[in-house]
Each structure stands twice: as C-alpha cells, then as structure tokens.
Image (cartoon, grey):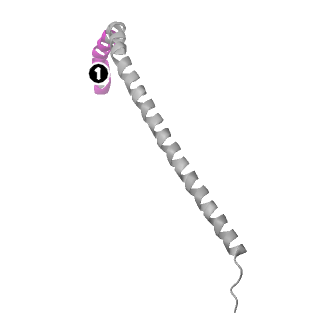
Amino acid sequence: MALLDDVLGNLGTTLLIGVGAALVAPVLLPVVGAVLRPVAKGLIKGGLYLVDAAQEIVAEGSEQLSDLVAEVQAERALAATTVATTPPPEQ
C-alpha cells in the first residue's frame, strides 16, 4: 500500500507541473525560438566556412600530388629512353 500511496500522493504535484508547463509553453517557446534561431544560423555559417576551407585544402593537396606524379612519370620515361638509346660499352 505504501507504493500506491507514493504514486497517488505525487499525482497532484505532477498534474500541477504538467498544467503549468502547458500554460507557459505557448508564451515561452516563441521567445526561446527567437533567441536560438540566430545562434543556430551562426553555427551553420561557421560549419559551412570550415567545409569550404577543408575542400580548398584538399583540392590544393590533390593538385600538388598530381603534379608530383606527372613529374615522376616524365622522369621515368626520360630515364627509359636514355637507357634504350645509349649504346652498350665496348669491351
């Protein structure tokens, strides 16, 4: 019975809190929304800035890597043609 008394004893308090929240919510939510909207927009702008900066860094690194690969391939091709056109040493 003690458990039933605890549940029913807190029912009035819980009910009052619920009714109070339901009455205050329509007034409070637009105010909270008006405050949080600019904050959310600022966070989104910052995130977009970071993404753009990261994309630029990755693109630049990719371009440099591509240039290095092309340079090494050209050096290999030059070395191969040099070896192929060089006559063997006479003994």
Q: Report the side of 82 relative to 10 (left or right).
A: right
Nearest the camera: 61 or 75?
75
In this picture, is 67 found above or below 45? below
Q: Is the stretch drawn in magenta largely helix, strand or loop?
A: helix
Residue 20: which quarter of the image?
top left
Residue 39: which quarter of the image?
top left
Nearest the camera: 22 or 38?
38
Residue drawn at (27%, 15%) of the image? 13
Q: Name the residue furthest bottom.
A: 91
Q: Quadrant of the C terminus?
A: bottom right
The secondary element bearing badge 1 is classed as helix
In this picture, is 10 found above or below 23? below
Residue drawn at (45%, 37%) of the image? 53
Q: Report the side of 82 relative to 26 (left or right).
A: right
- Where residue 58 appears, x then y in whole percent? 50, 44
In reply to whether residue 6 is colored magenta, the answer given is yes
Nearest the camera: 7 or 2?
7
Nearest the camera: 85 or 56?
85
- Where residue 18 appears, x then y in whole percent? 34, 13
Residue drawn at (55%, 47%) of the image? 63
Q: Report the side of 64 relative to 35 (left or right).
A: right
In reply to whether residue 74 is colored magenta, the answer given is no
Residue 22: which quarter of the image?
top left
Q: Quadrant of the N terminus?
A: top left
- Where residue 6 appears, x then y in whole percent? 28, 23
Residue drawn at (67%, 71%) of the image? 82
Q: Which residue is mark 1?
A: 5
- Where residue 16 appears, x then y in whole percent? 29, 11
Q: Report the side of 75 relative to 86 (left or right).
A: left
| Dot 1 crowding, Cα within 10 Å, few <14, some 14–19, many 20+ | few
Q: Amino acid at mark 1?
A: Asp
Magenta range is: 2-20
